[in-house]
Image (cartoon, grey):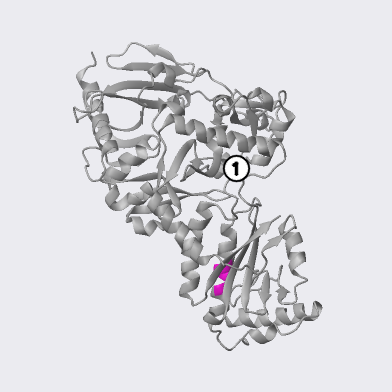
Amino acid sequence: MADEDERTNKSMSLSVRLLREGQSIDESLRDDHGLEERASEAGRLFVGQAPAVSPAWFKFVRDFAVGEFRPLVNQSCAAVLFLDVPPEDKRKATRTVALTFGTGHHSLDPDAFERSFGLKVVLNAVARSNLRSVDIATLDATTFQKRIQASRDADLRGFGIDVDRDLLRLAAGSPRDNSFARSLAGKDALTLHTKTSPADVVEKCKTALRLYHATDYREDFGFIDFVTPVRQQDLIEQLDAAVFAELQELVKGNASDLHITLPDILSPEESVEVGYFGIGLKSGRKQAYGQIAIEDYVEELKAGQIAEIADMAELRASHDIRVIADGGGDKKQKRKLYDCFVYELTYKGNTYVLFAGDWFVVDKTFHTAVENDFLKLVAKKPFVASTNTQNEREFIAELDAHKNLLNLDQVKLSPAGAPGANLEPCDFLSTTRQFIHLKDGHSSAPISHLWNQGVVSAESFVRDEQFRIELRKEVKKRQAKSKKAGFDAILPDGRSKPVPSEFTVVFGIMRDRYKKSGTVSIPFFSKVSLRAVASRIELMGFPVEVHLVERI
């Protein structure tokens, strides 16, 4: 037994993960975990000591040294302790948690553990006024992730979260119960900064389990239920099959909205080259890429044997993204490629989103509200109903021939006090006083860039005299060059303030018809991001319209 000193509570950090129900401890360890099981007073204990190795930069540094230079080495150690935790509510089953130390978390299979366990505990334990840090992901054609930190505990409102469109990924703060922990941080794992000992660690885990099942979070953080995890395994398999079919379409050279992004935030120091590994991919020395992109992954599939990959389950088990070192992949620095997929689809009346290795379903009430707001903005008669052009450049050239449209593409203006700002007023100005902003909705750039362009342009037109003067000058130049007339007359001179209600902000988006529904529309999360943008523009007094242009 441990002596009395070892049972005294001491300050330390605990990293806790919750094993999924039905998963065994042996199944939760990676096949190549390399840990040794040791006898334990409670639960099961696995430990490992990595051999001393020189860092990758040692040879480079050594070449600068003069005289004898003893090798520099790194050496890491790891431990994973599995404990059974009886619930406070006797009606619930006993659960197993994994406590990791050192590099122990690298030995675990992420799929064996509950997603968002730590996040749920934190949101139930921490008041909205005592947050310290949050990670959010904004889902779009490109996924934007950011970490927002406060210098001290702050209210949720101060973090600037858009509750409609931001997916909360991590939260940290000070819990109401100081005896549980001084501070908490949670994503999939829960990190507690607390006083503990082997004698009371199970009680800490028991409290964490109770908080995981609690619903207190709904009062201040209920927006996280707008998008909730899917847990039905048969449904997940059906959704995965749809993604695998999209991947096959990309390999054939067809378009798809499927893309990949790292599901967690990397520090700038981790900007390294990566490669793609797994069955069916090109073997031999690996191509190194400076960033992950669906286009590069598809090229690797084309160069390999995609026929060897039976389904998404096989891809999920095999395909990794690894840091490249000397033409090979570092097995310690790898992520499952499945965890990097981002995809949205409508299936049996529900909208689902794949992100960070989990499927999420969009709340129906929230979905209906977003769809209704979007439909109010969609013009029944777009300025152009369809186009045979294949990209934005070709489409702009086609529209240039219309007498009622003046091409302002690539016009760059700078408002007063912001020299070199290079703001685009719009892509086309119409004789009916429309500021038309265009986007190829199936390009790799996110549609949200279009929304932002519309906001900035509208604000500058209303507030900035210098912007209006420069805009009128450019309009005169463009209409003279294109042998058109009358466009400058619809704009106020620089000193006269415009009446926003006399102009319309138009978002024109080229889109292919969806294969299943046969409709022309945009992704759900692009509609979500449009809500706040449209509201902001309308508050300035401008009408807002979305013109969907079918690409034939």
- Placement of 279 over or under 353, stated as above or below: above
Residue displayed at 62% across by 81% down: 468
Q: Is residue 456 magenta?
A: yes
Q: Amino acid at mark 1?
A: Leu
Q: Which residue is mark 1?
A: 258
Residue 340: quarter of image: top right
Residue displayed at 71% across by 77% down: 404
Residue numbers of the magenta segment: 454-458
- Residue 289 visible within the image: no
Q: Residue 177: percent from the left, percent from the top? A: 21, 42
Residue displayed at 43% across by 24% down: 104
Q: Is residue 57 magenta?
A: no
Which image quadrant: the N terminus? top left
- In this view, the residue in front, 13 or 388, is 388
Q: Residue 484: percent from the left, percent from the top? A: 77, 80
Q: Residue 59: percent from the left, percent from the top? A: 66, 28
Residue 385: quarter of image: bottom right
- In this view, the residue in front, 70 or 47, is 47
Left or right of 479: which side holds 110? left
Q: Residue 131: percent from the left, percent from the top? A: 33, 50
Which image quadrant: the C terminus? bottom right
- In this view, the residue in front, 93 or 183, is 93
- In this view, the residue in front, 257 or 197, is 257
- Placement of 523 over or under 41, stated as above or below: below
Q: Main secondary structure of the magenta part?
A: helix
